[in-house]
Amino acid sequence: MLVVAGISSAGIAGSALTSGELRGPVALTLGLDAAAVPVLRTAPVDISAEMTADLARKGQDLAPRFAVPEISQLTPDDGGSWLDVEEQWVLWRQRIVAPGAISVNLGFSRFHLPKGARLTIHPTGMTSLDDPRHFWTFTERNNEAHGQLWTPVVLADDITVELLLPRSELGDYALELESINKGYRLFGEDLADKAGSCNVDVVCPEGDPWRSEIATVGVYTLNGSWTCTGAMINNTAEDQTPFFLTANHCGINSGNAASMVVYWNFESPTCGQQGGGSLAENQAGATFLASSSTSDFCLVELNADPDPAWKVAYAGWYRGSDDPSAAIAIHQPNTDEKSISFEYDPTSTTTYLLTPVPGDGSHIRITDWDVGTTEPGSSGSPLFDPGHHIVGQLHGGYAACGNDTSDWYGRLSVSWDGNDASSRLRDWLDPLGSAPMALGTLDPNAAAFQVSPGTGLQATGDVGGPFAPASQVYVLNNVAAYAVDYQITSDVAWAVVSNGTGTLAAGGTDSVTVSIGGTAATLPTGTFTGTVSLVNLTDGSGDTTRPLQLKVGIPELIMSFPLDSDPLWSMDAGWAFGIPQGGGGSHGDPDPVSGYSGANVLGYNLAGDYENNLLERWLTTTSLDLTGVTSVTVKFRRWLGVEQPAYDHASFQVSSDGVNFTPIWSNSVTVSDGAWTSVEYDLSAVADGQQTVFLAWVMGMTDDSWQYCGWNIDDIEIWGLRNSVSAVETPPAPAATVGNYPNPFNPLTRVSYDLPAAGRISLGVYDIHGRLVRLLIEDMRPAGPGSVVWDGQDNRGQSVGSGVYFARLVSAQGVTQHKMVLVK
């Protein structure tokens, strides 16, 4: 063994090593140099090749992949290096470099640690415990009878494994690395592969009535390379046994259940963000219990109870064979941040992927989602009936943002019975043998005061009224064992609350109506907003709000661009104004031969398909003045061909400053229009009342294989309401602020912020196209000022180029950003 120069037991006596309070890697605590650690270098990750392989797997009823395994047989006896650190401790370290990987996770075929030992996996060279790439530590508490350990992901391509042992326990450990799993996509690490924009974050108000059920759902990895969704499910003993329901086609069996890693509460911190989720709350290992291919179910028992701090709940279920009158899905689309989807129409019973009723009776068919969708990675996620019971888990289908196609869920009623305990649910979910048709959700952390629905009141009408809908009824529930006093108020005069105060007995329910009041008839043209506050006066548990919106007036055409002449907008190479030639179509349909209403279009490569290996190419309007205009929408005709977003990308974006663009639409599936299609998008969140608005159509990025015809657009129109007054009545809340110094800077700058109230924040650095460069903070922060240093590097530790960047702060007060200039 080697002795670390300059470090003796006296030098760190009484330190974190001895006291047992070590919080992070030993290398960080002692300042050890990573350069001296032996390096195991894997084969490079060919992301394009893996994406192509995924395409070949599509349609084979297999779980989505996110990583490529590389087999390794490495132990501390035949690799790495040992160091003496203090008289009582020895440290083994091994560095692993996986070129091109987005993440790395490890599978140990043998794992056993004695008391006091620690195994830590961390990004090489990490300098802070707040490193957003994550580090993970394991102790004797992670020892399992199966003797394996599979780790969560580290968001880096260069990691270090360190084993800290009491010297007295050198002969009493087992550690053998079997699999190095090299991530090429997962958990939103690749921004181009994020979930579709139509998905609804569970933190949005739509999720409020489903908080307990949301807390049951987790995303998981298997064998370090596959991924699906599942849910904790209740049993009649209601003893919080960690039963986890998912899909059979996700591939879990008795031989690999130990490799499961479940991530809880991977959710956006802010409604609409569809990003920024944390992977910190996770647990490893499970035992296979039962499965069946008929209804595509799989049930496992997790090796440990979830940490109580994670507030995991246990979903209720219904085993009847009738069709739910509506359905709700809670899932992790593309294994990104958790989303919620709604089907308001009755479901039907069919065979998997078929439509005749009842077929073989094994599946529930969702005809088409009314709000949200599902995507690969949603497989195994639960389907709930309106009574908050699981009635099935996702097998597959064709649903995606932008289409009205179906999904199929394996019926829980079919999964209930089978030949024996290994092929049915009843033995596990009904240990008491009481045979109930339904069991409610068990949520040890449920809020006392619950309100449904989660949507606000959105009404429209001409000046003077009438307005529709005229009202919204909210149902109030008290799930606590004590009475709750409540108060419901509106902060605008045109929305009136009836039955606004009262008391709910333990287990009681009541309703309150919010109506458009008489003063609404006096309002001028415009869009008016407000908030309904629903407050638990007894203890505040479950306090919530609902948005109000009133659109007064009939939308009118504000400006149009029929493309009879060139509008002279900014065009990157490849974009052109003119007559399309009808070329291309090597895959999908070719370009049109004219515009929709005339000869001309704005299009990408009017002579044929877009190129391979294309970087983003932008068509951007000149500044559009929408001062005094609200409820802004854009309408245009589209003829588009683009391959699915695993390979190629097209998007439509909007900006109020010409620098920071917000994606409004992007392809979530392959698009091949083959005819002129009318599309309309709501731009109000960005464009309402703005003096400068820019629209942009983006072609790219693309891979090196299939090519499609790309963008053709015609007849662009801006619609909205012309306001006669400022229409927003809600008083402005105190704003959070963000800045930096020095500015311009090289290579370091301190990014400062000031919060009017304590809460969870996300502070990141973004490029001029709105893409995340570096996540600086994702955590709770107290009210008042704070700061963090940005070193000019991205999330992968690589230095970024000179240019304009934006510090973006997301908090309960909204989104605030600040321009920074890096010069070199």
Image (cartoon, rainbow, N blue to C red):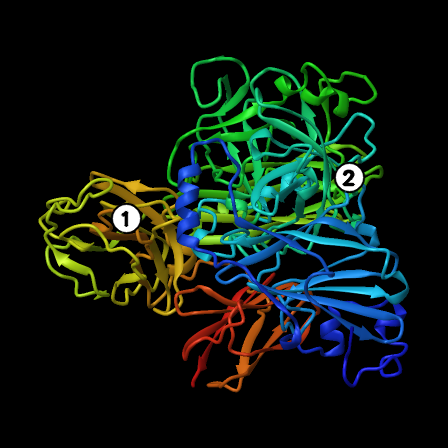
Secondary element at image label 1: strand
Q: Given the image, on which type of amino acid does mark 2 rest?
A: Thr
**Residue 492 appears in view:** no
Q: Nearer the viewer, residue 475 or 480?
A: 480
Secondary element at image label 2: strand
Residue pictured at 48% horizontal, 22% vertical: 352
Compared to residue 74, the image places residue 27 above or below, namely below
Q: Closer to us: mark 1 or mark 2? A: 1
Q: Quadrant of the N terminus?
A: bottom right
- Looking at marks 1 and 2 on the same chain, the residue that comes earlier in the sequence is marked by 2
Rendered location of residue 156, percent (x, y): 57, 63
Rendered location of residue 193, percent (x, y): 45, 51
Label placed on residue 635: 1
Residue on which the image places disc 2 = 503
Residue pictured at 40% horizontal, 38% vertical: 56
The image quadrant of residue 117 is: bottom right
Compared to residue 793, the image places residue 475 above or below, namely above
Compared to residue 658, the image places residue 253 above or below, namely above
Q: Nearer the viewer, residue 632 or 412?
A: 412
The image quadrant of residue 761 is: bottom right
Q: Nearer the viewer, residue 212 or 492?
A: 212
In the visual, does 609 lie left or right of 740? left
Question: How far apart in space, not on screen, are marks 1 and 2 (Cα)?
Answer: 48 Å
Compared to residue 46, the image places residue 297 above or below, namely above
Rendered location of residue 724, percent (x, y): 36, 59
| Residue at the front extreme, as displayed | 78
